[in-house]
Image (spheres, helix red, strand yellow):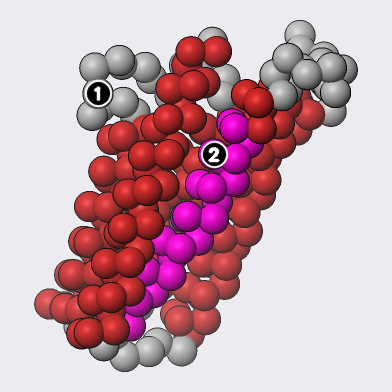
């Protein structure tokens, strides 16, 4: 188990470093091309640096104090707490997307389709690489996230997975919107994606809270 945790910690660091470069690239090209979509993706990536940073710091603290007598029952709950916090943010983000999609549905803004499609594809590629690193597809030591009880890792994983889902839905909506002139689709897919994210976030919250408040498992 400890080895798996260390592996997750290492993968997190790779993902964070990669995300920092991606963020810089998106913001840089966003300014150059004056693309608000690309800039928005860049700022979203800066949020990733913060939340994935939280995930990583939790690993480091839990590892550093693992043999300390400062903790009555070891440090494994530090990761659970970080996972709970990430899941909470994930749920709030989903609510934010629902709110924004609903207001865009009733007050559609003009969408620069082509620009938004490219920005979404760029974000999709970046998040796909992050997920591949986290799933261990890019190295030989294979380990599935699904089997793991590492909720710190799972929360980070589901955030990236959520973004991939939203990107795919957004690209579909934008392409259809561009060719069939339907401006409401983007808002609709936003709501569908956000509901899916809410389900993931509440599952994570339920599982982490159970551990944090020591609910007896049957
Ligand atoms: Zn995100």
- Residue farthest to the left, as pictured: 179
74 sits to left or right of 128: right
**Mark identifier at residue 64:** none
195 sits to left or right of 11: right
- Of residues 67 and 120, the one nearer the viewer is 67
Residue 167 visible, this angle: no
Q: Considering the image in quadrants, where does the N terminus appear?
A: top right
Image height of 147 relative to 128, above or below: above
Q: Which residues are magenta?
A: 35-60
Q: Position of residue 136 (x, y in %)?
A: 31, 26
**Residue sitting at 84 percent across and 28 percent down?**
213
Cα distance in 3D space between marks 2 and 1: 19 Å
**Residue sitting at 20 percent across and 79 percent down?**
115
* 41 falls in the magenta region: yes
Image quarter of residue 205: top right
- Mark 2 vs 1, N-terminal side: 2
Residue 153 visible, this angle: yes
What residue sits right under mark 1 in the picture? 139
Q: Main secondary structure of the magenta part?
A: helix
């Amino acid at each position: 188990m400890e080895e798996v945790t260390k592996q997750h910690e290492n993968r997190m660091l790779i993902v964070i470093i990669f995300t920092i470069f991606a963020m810089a690239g998106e913001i840089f090209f966003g300014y150059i091309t004056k693309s608000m979509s690309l800039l928005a993706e860049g700022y979203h990536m800066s949020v990733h640096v913060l939340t994935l940073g939280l995930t990583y710091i939790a690993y480091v603290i839990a590892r550093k104090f693992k043999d300390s007598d400062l903790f009555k029952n070891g440090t494994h709950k530090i990761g659970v707490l970080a996972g709970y916090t990430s899941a909470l943010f994930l749920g709030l983000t989903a609510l934010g997307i629902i709110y924004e999609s609903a207001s865009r549905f009733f007050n559609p803004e003009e969408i620069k389709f082509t620009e938004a499609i490219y920005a979404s594809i760029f974000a999709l590629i970046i998040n796909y690489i992050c997920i591949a690193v986290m799933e261990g597809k890019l190295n030989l030591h294979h380990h599935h996230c699904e089997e793991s009880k590492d909720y710190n890792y799972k929360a980070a994983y589901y955030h990236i997975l959520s973004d991939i889902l939203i990107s795919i839905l957004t690209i579909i909506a934008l392409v259809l919107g561009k060719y069939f002139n339907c401006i409401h689709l983007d808002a609709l897919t936003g709501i569908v994606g956000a509901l899916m994210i809410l389900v993931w976030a509440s599952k994570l919250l339920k599982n982490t809270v159970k551990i944090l408040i020591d609910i007896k498992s049957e």
